[in-house]
Amino acid sequence: MRTTKTYFVYILTNKSNKTIYIGVTNNIVRRVFEHKNKLNKGFTEKYNINKLVYYETFQYIKEAIKREKQLNRFPRSKKEDLINEINPEWNELKPPINYL
């Protein structure tokens, strides 16, 4: 039985990879589903951002929030470099489901 929670910092983009969105969640499967189905009104719905291209895992929410803020301060080129390191084709990643 898992006793620690896992938190995720994730990067989504749209079909054309023109717009990047960075978020944090404790349930990446649910969160990606919400983005794909436009369940939350706002930025990601407006720009059709629903393609998961990057994520990191954290044991503590404070660490995840700190990383999310750090990534949001990065220039676009540095965000692209980060994605390119693990996903050079910017393929849509499947959210990990083995963390539950």
Image (spheres, rainbow, N blue to C red):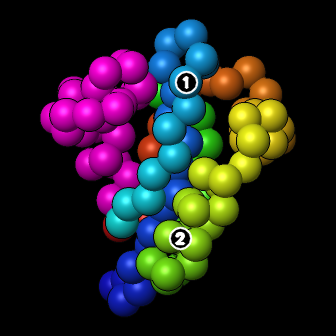
3D distance between C-alphas at marks 1 and 2: 22 Å
- Residue holding disc 2: 64
In the rendered image, the vertical position of residue 55 relative to residue 52, given as above or below:
below
Tell whether 2 sits left or right of 56: left
Read off the magenta span: 27-50
> What's the amino acid at mark 2?
Ala
Vertical position of residue 37 compared to residue 15: above or below: below
Q: Is residue 68 visible?
A: yes
Q: Position of residue 74 (x, y in %)?
A: 72, 49
Residue closer to the observer: 58 or 99: 58
Q: Taking 70 as reference, is 11 left or right?
A: left
Q: Residue at x 31, y 21 (%)?
A: 46
Give the number of the disc on residue 70. Answer: none
Q: Is residue 32 magenta?
A: yes
Q: Is residue 64 above or below residue 48?
A: below
Q: Amino acid at mark 1?
A: Thr
